[in-house]
Image (cartoon, rainbow, N blue to C red):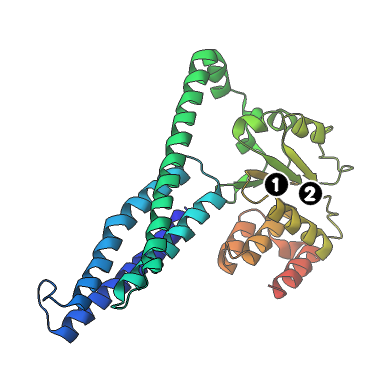
């Protein structure tokens, strides 16, 4: 979850504020309370104000993310909360306080609370309403969807491997499964299999685009893969960031190789994770042209 990043950063900030309050107590030799010392009182209020607002703010941001808020919005809320808390803490901690810092910090904090709360509320209600409509109007269809034939399920595609919560990979995807991708929440398909391959699905582009999905065809010659092929793949993955993507070829050899390098390049995986993902599908050392290319691409990371 994205919110975990900001929860961790804010927790570290809370530790720093705690240390500041403790050091102020020791310096002023105050065991309990503020000892009628303005500096101690300010350290206490900075610490307490952070503890009062930050947890509930993180909770509603997490609620918004779980409800389906866009990644950009979640990042924006997290950054705004972090900046707001820093401004407030720095401003209030000073004896000669610049009130603009306190005001700016609280305005950012309150804005985060309002926007995150409304977003979570809106998405939750919209999702509940949509689910009710599907249940009442398409109950029988839902039952059919739950009992679709095995060949119509994306997860039953050859060498299917989920790569993340937004990206799945596989070898050839049957036409029946391609025709149901929108029902499975897929928003875009990247196909690395050349059209003249004996494994290619006829009219795959039409099957995908007719559902309103994005279709990207990047044919990669199995016998002569190039760095330029990987660059096109990398560009496509970056352009489709945030969408639910399925990437396939014939046997998930091309895809697992390219995706592993891309994931390592993006800092999503370390080398061990990338190697494990490939090894779960195939062994590039048995195909020199691929072993050489993957080694070369990794040297540039």
Label 1 packing within 10 angstroms: few (<14), some (14-19), many (20+):
many
Relative image position of residue 263 (x, y in whole percent): 63, 61
Vertical placement of 31 versus 259: above or below?
A: below
- Circle 1 SS class: strand
117 or 36: nearer the viewer: 36
> At numbered mark 2, what does the secondary structure look like: helix, strand or loop?
loop
Residue 79 to residue 298: above or below: above
Identity of the residue drawn at 38% across and 52% down = 110
> Left of 154 or right of it: where is 17?
left
**Residue 296 falls left or right of residue 45:** right
Q: Position of residue 111 (x, y in %)?
A: 43, 51
Task: Please give the name of the residue rendered at 63% of the width and 64% of the height, measured from the top-left corner.
Answer: 266
Seen from the viewer's position, the closer of residues 188 and 103 is 103
Categorize mark 2 by other alpha carbons within 10 Å: few (<14), some (14-19), many (20+).
Answer: many
- Quarter in which the C terminus is drawn: bottom right
Given residues 286 and 249, the one toward you in this image is: 249
x and y, in percent, of residue 82 in the image? 43, 63
Q: Which residue is mark 1?
A: 247
Q: Is residue 226 visible?
A: no
| Alpha carbon separation for disc pair 1 and 2 | 8 Å
Q: Are marks 1 and 2 in contact (CB under 8 Å)?
A: yes
Sequence-first disc among 1 and 2: 2
Q: Does 150 sit above or below residue 57?
A: above
- Determine the residue located farthest toward the right in the rendered image: 196
Residue 107's x, y, as percent? 41, 56
Disc ID at residue 192: 2
What is the tally of numbered marks visible in this picture?
2
> Splitting the image into 4 quarters, where does residue 256 fall?
bottom right
The residue drawn where x is 53% and y is 18% is 143
Tell me which residue sits at (39%, 59%) in the image. Answer: 7
User: Where on the picture, by quarter, is residue 83?
Assistant: bottom left
Q: Is residue 89 visible?
A: yes
């Amino acid at each position: 979850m994205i919110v975990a990043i900001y929860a961790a950063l804010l927790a570290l900030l809370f530790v720093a504020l705690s240390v500041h309050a403790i050091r102020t107590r020791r310096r002023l030799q105050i065991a309990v309370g503020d000892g009628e010392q303005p500096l101690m009182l300010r350290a206490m209020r900075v610490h307490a104000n952070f503890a009062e607002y930050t947890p509930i703010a993180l909770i509603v941001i997490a609620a918004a993310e779980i409800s389906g808020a866009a990644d950009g919005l979640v990042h924006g809320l997290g950054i705004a909360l972090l900046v707001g808390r820093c401004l407030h803490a720095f401003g209030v901690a000073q004896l000669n306080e610049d009130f603009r810092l306190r005001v700016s910090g609280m305005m950012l904090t309150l804005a985060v609370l309002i926007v995150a709360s409304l977003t979570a509320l809106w998405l939750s209600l919209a999702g509940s309403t949509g689910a009710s409509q599907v249940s009442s109007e398409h109950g029988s269809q839902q039952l059919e969807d739950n009992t679709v034939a095995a060949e119509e399920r994306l997860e039953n595609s050859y060498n299917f491997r989920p790569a993340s919560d937004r990206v799945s990979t596989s070898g050839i995807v049957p036409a029946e499964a391609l025709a149901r991708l929108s029902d499975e929440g897929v928003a875009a398909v990247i196909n690395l299999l050349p059209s003249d391959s004996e494994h290619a699905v006829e009219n795959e582009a039409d099957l995908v685009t007719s559902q309103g999905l994005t279709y990207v065809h990047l044919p990669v010659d199995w016998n002569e893969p190039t760095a330029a092929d990987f660059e096109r793949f990398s560009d496509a993955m970056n352009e489709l960031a945030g969408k639910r993507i399925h990437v396939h070829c014939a046997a998930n050899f091309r895809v697992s190789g390219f995706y592993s390098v891309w994931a390592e390049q993006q800092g999503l995986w370390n080398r061990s994770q990338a190697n494990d993902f490939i090894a779960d599908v195939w062994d590039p050392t048995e195909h020199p042209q691929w072993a050489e290319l993957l080694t070369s691409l990794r040297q540039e990371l």
